[in-house]
Each structure stands twice: as structure tokens, then as C-alpha cells.
Amino acid sequence: MLTSQLRQLLRHVLQSGDYAALPATVAGLSHADRRQCGVLLGEELLPAMGEEYWRIFAAVVPTDPKAYLGTFLKALSLLLRRDRNCWRDPLLANFLRNQASDIDRRKCAETIMPRLEGIADIEELVAICFPDAKEGKALFLLRTATPQAYFLLFKHLRTIDDDAATLRKYCIALLKRGDSLSFNMAYIIQDYFGLERLPATFSLHLQPYQYSRLEQSYDEFCQLLTNHPSKH
């Protein structure tokens, strides 16, 4: 089918408001046409739906997240460029809390988090996407590897501060990343939690009085993590 014909077909379904009919419509197409539908929906048609996007999401994605979540997240990344707060919708929260798998939640977090700036927004997103605060949360934050992610990782690790083996495991993972920020984070974890010395040489060195500042706020933590301490 020609791209123009596919576009017209999909647009007709979306404009009809019968969003639940979209999966059956796509399923009746050839494999090549289904792939093209994904491109049209993700890059063009869904981003143009505005406030209706989440209603379409709720009607389609839970029917087959493996088939549709990636397409909808591609559209969401475009919507987030226009409005960083567009992820705050009860329909997304319901999907994440009641319908999504761990993998689905991680994919949503990976799409939304880079568009957020405030630490409170990021912490709220992580709490929704990783409600059980298990290893998946820590690994996601470690992989994200931004100052905001490392601050939330630090807060999470403080809840398991008696598990030296797990703390050390994360330190080794940070060292394997090889960048200066991750090395600084590994050093902070090592000294803050009193772990055995790690197999690395660190450029960051903090005084004992500075460790209480790590707990005070994201700004204080970030200044120490990036080795740009405040002058007070």
C-alpha cells in the first residue's frame, strides 16, 4: 500500500475517535505496511493528536505493549519537546502502575527522564516507574549516569546501607563506566558507606565534614560530585 494510502487509513481511524479499532486495522496489513504504520504513527500522526494522545495510548498500548509501546514512546519524545509536563497524565500513571511490565516501565522512564530538569520531577517519575525500589531502579539510575540520577541512586543506597556486598557491586559497575563522574560517584559511595578500598585511584577527595552535605540537597550533592564545592 502506498504511504499516502496508509496515512489516510490511519488518520481516518484516529479522527473517528474509535481508537480501540487501531490494532485490528494495523493487524490486517502486510508486514511491510505495519512497519510503515509505526513510522507514520510515531513520527507524524500521534504527535499531532495533542491532548488526545493519552486516550489513544490507553486504548491501544495495553492491548500489546511489545507491538505498540515503542511507537507511542517515539511520539511522546516529540511531544515532550513541546511540553516537558505532558507526561503527567492519569492514563499514563494507570498504565505504569497497573498494566506495564518492568520492561515497559523502564522504557517509559528512559524516554521521559532526559526531557526533565527539576530533581523533584525526576524523583517522581522514578518513583512511579520503579515502585518496588528494587535492583531495577538502581541499575536504571546507574545506566542513566547523570548527576540527577546519581543523587537518586545515593538516596536509594542509603536505604540499603547495611548491604556492603551490593554497595560494592554498584561501585565496580561505576568504575567500569570509566568516566570521571562515575569515578567520583564510586568514591563517594566507598567513603560514605565505609566500604573496603576499591581497585581505583580517585581524583576526588572529600573531608569528613563534607559528607553530611551530601544528604542536604541535590545542589549540595551535585557540587561535591562534580568536584565544584561551594565556597561556604
Image (cartoon, rainbow, N blue to C red):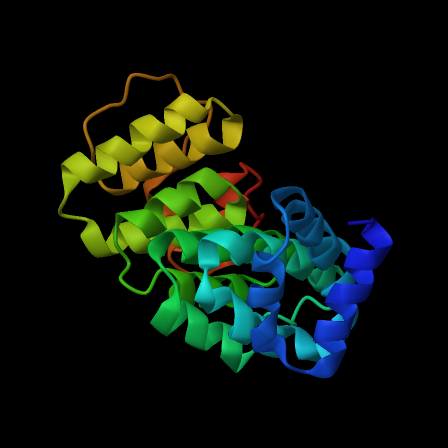
Q: Is residue 10 left or right of residue 190?
A: right
Left or right? Give the position of 111 relative to 135: right
Residue shown at 39% from the left, 22% from the top: 176
* Residue 83 figure quarter: bottom right
The foreground one among 153 and 94 is 94
- Of 56 and 31, nearer the camera is 31
Q: Residue 160 location, x and y as percent?
A: 20, 51
On the image, the x and y values in percent for residue 223 come to: 54, 46
- Most extreme residue toward the right is 4
Query: Residue at 61% of width from left, 51% of height from top?
Result: 114
**What is the x, y in percent for residue 42?**
69, 56
Q: Is residue 196 above or below residue 167?
A: above
Q: Residue at x 72, y 82 (%)?
A: 16
In this rendered view, identify the residue nearer to me: 96 or 62.
62
- Which quadrant of the figure has residue 88? bottom right
State the image coordinates of residue 103 (x, y, percent, origin top left): 39, 51
Q: Is residue 134 left or right of residue 122?
A: left
Residue 220 appears in the figure: no
Q: Is residue 181 left or right of residue 132?
A: right
Q: How many marks?
A: 0
Kindly tell me whether residue 199 is visible in this rendering. Answer: yes
The correct choice, above or below, for 139 with respect to 79 in the image is above
Q: Is residue 48 above or below residue 186?
A: below
Q: Residue at x 27, y 22 (%)?
A: 198
Q: Nearer the viewer, residue 117 or 130?
A: 130
